[in-house]
Image (spheres, coloured by chain):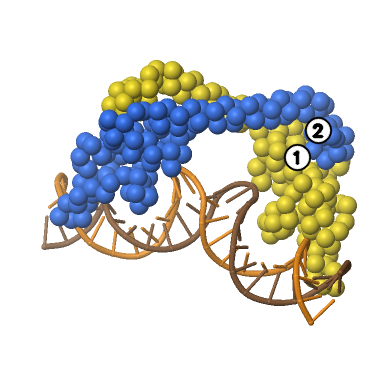
Chain colours: A blue, B yellow, C brown, D orange
DNA sequence: GCTTGACCTTGTAGTGGCTACAAGGTGCAT
DNA sequence: ATGCACCTTGTAGCCACTACAAGGTCAAGC
């Protein structure tokens, strides 16, 4: 499979696939006579794995570790579990922070009565008011 | 006021203040005889404005615009209002996306029974299962 | 056989919003 | 005169890509 085909199949863009290879997160595949990357199903599976983990917000170092762990069939998956839990915690914290932002923005906007700038409650809130 | 003092007063680090100046978001202050930046209260107020807007998640281009608008006292603040509303929408969308992540992560983790990797439901979910 | 166009190759630079560092100058207390 | 905190400039690094430039390869159509 050439890179374009595997890109279509996995939903990972060709540029991104090359980037993963440069980063050492995806093994370099063999090349055809004309120096094109030639992928098999294993690489495609790895790419799908990476894409799903990215969709779930895992960082590249996390994914690197998940990939390594996924090869050690006999080990306990406690490490996987704790990595996932730590990430979940981070996501929860990010949500909480954004909710604070959302509420503060909502309050600020609600006070605006579309006057002139000099009366604007939004500018006012940013410039002067206590938090 | 030297940069360190204004940094302490505004909660914006000295490096970041210099960065804002380079980016043209904060006016370059006069210099002392020894070439140190010499800030007045107006610059400090601008920095507090920027910090609050950053805390609310506004982007640098947004802040640039808010700062420009904040100087035009006579104009309607409709532009400010719509900028803030657009940003609020974005924050809401980000929260929604993170909540999807959170729920999927939670489900994945809940299924893990701390077996060996070969049985790990987390690795399994990433590698094989449909979404 | 020649062109067209889709695909591939490498390498480099840009994104955002800082942050860290290096190498050196200044100001004040001891 | 020495030490230390502070300041200066400039450059590179962070993350996870994305975009672009300049060129090579291959199959189809004329």
Taking the image as shown, residue A77 lies to the left or right of residue A33, namely right
Q: Nearer the viewer, residue B23 or B39?
A: B39
User: Residue B55 appears at what percent x and percent y?
Assistant: 70, 38
User: Residue D23 appears at what percent x and percent y?
Assistant: 28, 64
Q: CA distance from mark 1 to mark 2?
A: 9 Å
Residue at image position (63%, 27%) is: A96
CA neighbours of label 1 inside 10 A, class few (<14), some (14 to 19), many (20+): some
User: Residue B47 appears at what percent x and percent y?
Assistant: 78, 48
Taking the image as shown, residue B61 lies to the left or right of residue B98, namely right
- Residue B37 picture quarter: bottom right
Q: Nearer the viewer, residue D12 or B87?
A: D12
Residue at image position (47%, 33%) is: A57
Taking the image as shown, residue B51 lies to the left or right of residue C1, namely right
Residue at image position (85%, 69%) is: B32
- Per the image, the residue denoted by label 1 is B52
Q: Nearer the viewer, residue A30 or B117?
A: B117
């Amino acid at each position: 499979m050439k890179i374009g085909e595997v890109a279509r199949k996995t939903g990972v863009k060709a540029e991104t696939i090359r980037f993963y290879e440069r980063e050492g997160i995806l093994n370099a595949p063999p090349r055809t006579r004309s120096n094109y990357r030639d992928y098999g199903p294993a690489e495609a599976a790895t790419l799908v794995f990476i894409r799903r983990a990215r969709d779930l917000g895992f960082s590249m170092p996390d994914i690197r570790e998940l990939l390594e762990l996924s090869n050690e069939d006999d080990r306990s998956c406690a490490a996987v579990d704790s990595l996932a839990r730590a990430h979940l915690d981070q996501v929860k914290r990010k949500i909480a922070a954004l909710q604070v932002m959302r509420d503060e923005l909502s309050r600020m906007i609600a006070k605006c009565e579309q006057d002139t700038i000099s009366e604007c409650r939004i500018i006012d809130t940013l410039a002067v008011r206590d938090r």
